[in-house]
Image: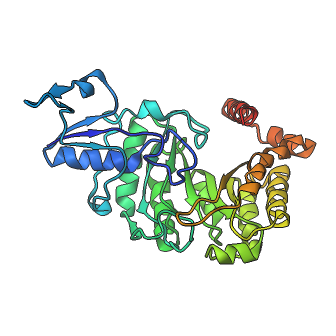
Amino acid sequence: MRILYLPNEYSQQRQREKKRKIYPVIMAMEAEFCRKQGHEVYWGRSDRNYNFIFDYGDHLVLPYDKVITEPEGLPFLSLPHPDRVFTQWWEFQDNGNFKYHPGTYIQAANGCWWGKCSFCVEQKNKWEVRPVYDVISEINECQALGFKEIFDDSGTFPIGRWLDEFCRKFNKSTGHNKLKIGCNMRLVDIDYDMLYHSNFRMLLFGLESANQSTLDKIRKGVKVEDVKYIIKAAKAGLEPHICVIFGIPGETDSDAIKTLKLVHYLLRKGYAKTAQASFYQVPGETGNETHRKFIKRIYEAAYSPQFWFNQIKDIKNIADLKYLWRKIKAGLSR
């Protein structure tokens, strides 16, 4: 079978509202699976991929049996590591998740171990976790290719015994002293010092809202006071990135402003190093359109001298300085 994998800005993006050119790690794993099955696999746009041919009825057809733009849902635990050269990793470097370049994505797990948030596109995914040794093996491959930072794009990074084993074995592996790791993390009480000493850098926390009634409504499974884990992670030396959602049905202007103020507080204090906001989008529901205006207002934290004091205080090397400059340019473009 001739298969063309044609990634786009949504192939690895969980939110359909925003286009992001993220390395489509699941698609890349599935492409390698099909290659190993003996299929004739092509990747991305090239002149070779668009040699149109005509059938006897003079109908224009593509010379492929399938053109794939998003993951097909092949059995996750059967998928091999992606071939990052075949899948053109260098096309996916313009990404705010990386301070150190080049960077790439992996996925230790499919779905999320909580899996109940009403807005999440992965809530129905079966929670499956790859063995620790297999994830470390892939990280070793990334190290050999010269990557300096990895972001794990599992819905939520595994915790508990899996995380303890990962950190212990990762620390015993050689050559990882300069490789940084980022991941999606729930607001949970874990050993953030252990993560820091295992070369984790950015943790992406889904804060979502500062209102408990809203968190209960979207089945987030956390308390507002669990924001303390963001602070705990920052004090351990990690770099939290926080995400919030505006436009959740039922929230008032007062509710939205409360969330906005919490984001500003965390950014000013340096507990959150970066932040992003999205608009509530769930099939069959209508978000509060009047609250879109709050999305860009999270960047008003930059009006505070305290914010800049903490940003400058965090500069320890040239990579930090370059990263700050990229954040400034990204903020000015919004």
Q: Is residue 209 left or right of residue 178?
A: right
- Give the camera-side residue of 118 and 59: 59
Residue 104 in the image: state x and y as whole percent.
47, 41
The image quadrant of residue 39 is: top left
Residue 23, picture quadrant: top left
Which one is in front, 91 or 82? 91
Q: Is residue 269 above or below residue 145?
A: below
Number of numbered tags placed on the structure image: 0
Instruction: Let me know if residue 19 appears in the view.
Output: yes
Residue 158 drawn at (x, y percent): 49, 66
| Residue 222 in view in this figure | no
Color scheme of the displayed model = rainbow
Q: Residue at x 37, y 51 (%)?
A: 26
Q: Position of residue 212 (x, y in %)?
A: 75, 75
Residue at 40% x, 54% y is 136
Q: Position of residue 174 (x, y in %)?
A: 44, 47
Q: Residue furthest right?
A: 305
Q: Furthest-top residue in view?
A: 47
**Going by the picture, which residue comes out furthest to the front?**
57
Q: Please report the residue visible at 41 percent of the width from the left and 34 percent of the height from the top.
A: 89
